[in-house]
Image (cartoon, rainbow, N blue to C red):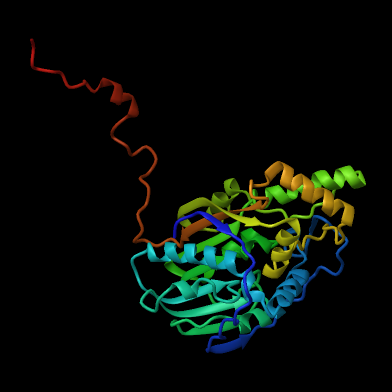
Amino acid sequence: MSSGVCLRVLRAAGSPPAASSGSWSRVRLPADPRHAARRALSASGRGGTMNVFNRDMKKKQKEWAASLRDGHQFDYLRDEVGGRVADRVYDIVRTFPLALDIGGGKSHIAGHLSKDVVERLFLTDVSERTLKQSRRSEIPTHRVLADEEFLPFKENTFDLVVSSLSLHWINDLPGALRQIQQVLKPDGVFIGAMVGGETLYELRCSLQLAETEREGGFSPHVSPYTAVTDLGNLLGQAGFSMLTVDVDDVQVNYPGIIEVMTDLQGMGESNCAWNRKSLLHRDTILAAEAIYKEMYGNEDGSIPATFEILYMIGWKPHESQAKPAKRGSANVSFGDLSKISQPTDTNTS
């Protein structure tokens, strides 16, 4: 699927997607050691992991988004990115007997895949209401209510693990990647997508300028995201090999800043950082609207919102995989390239 610009228009409410059939499992989630939203960046009880996001709040946001009668109209970004993740699955010429979709929600990836590629699928999400709305697909699917930070699966279980737009809300991303690597079988592959650090830079800048002007300071209203420069290191530290990381921008045009924030709520993508500010004053929103249109507005009066999508592919090591040559084993030096004589023209006039 080629990258491009998605235009948000006023969509007429249609019928919601049919719920898919399949089996269910409920997993007891570990108790959350975070008892109060009074900290910005603090260490949790899991080995000093940075505690940035209120995971309980994120669950409530996703449950609320799934309860909307017209919630399907906010699925456009997840459907687009899910299709691009599926494209990367198709690039690997093999059949995966058992796959896992982490934070899959309504199954935005499986709808783009066929049973010839994935024979069976486990779909997990922290929101039960979202899982109940997972879409029909030709792939036999087993839905599991589980937190992305605590995967309830044995090691060496899956041939393929995919994830689309859920890992950016995890506090312990290095630990989550290690768990993914562990549940993969040797020579299994992980293909994921998450939003990057430049996501919604237009909204972030407009709110900061407006809040500074009207209130004398600003608070973070857009969650912090992972930088693309860090992603390769995180995958390597988790034990993956043959890494691939690439970036793609998806730009969506909206009528105004209120529509941007409304759609983020409908996606279940509102800020859930502990240090978030829960209230925006009306004057600040109006000022941010004016700044947004002045700095980034389109000629037709709409405003763009950019989503930087980071795609990652990592393989669990196996003896059959290609390996780099040992250091110092080369028998040709780059310094010898200058000694190679250029071809001469034998035809003389």
Along the line of sight, the residue nearer the viewer: 12 or 193: 12
Which residue sits at x=54%, y=68%?
Answer: 79
In this rendering, the answer to whether 246 lies above or below 135 is above
**Residue 47 seen in the figure:** no
Which residue sits at x=52%, y=56%?
Answer: 311
Residue furthest out toward the top: 349
In this rendering, the answer to whether 327 lies above or below 27 is above
Which residue sits at x=82%, y=56%?
Answer: 40
Where in the figure is residue 285, as x and y percent of width and height?
83, 54
Side of 193 relative to 120 (left or right): right
**Residue 228 seen in the figure:** yes
Side of 161 relative to 174 (left or right): left
In this rendering, the answer to whether 128 lies above or below 237 is below
Side of 191 relative to 258 (left or right): left
Q: How many marks?
A: 0
Side of 188 relative to 82 (left or right): left
Which residue sits at x=35%, y=45%?
Answer: 325
Q: Quadrant of the N terminus?
A: bottom left
Along the line of sight, the residue nearer the viewer: 53 or 129: 129
Where in the figure is residue 181, as x and y percent of width and height?
52, 65
Where in the figure is residue 177, as x and y percent of width and height?
58, 62
Q: Quadrant of the C terminus?
A: top left
In this rendering, the answer to whether 235 lies above or below 101 is above
Residue furthest out toward the front: 300
Where in the figure is residue 172, as x and y percent of width and height?
68, 61
Q: Quadrant of residue 5?
A: bottom right
Residue furthest out toward the right: 215
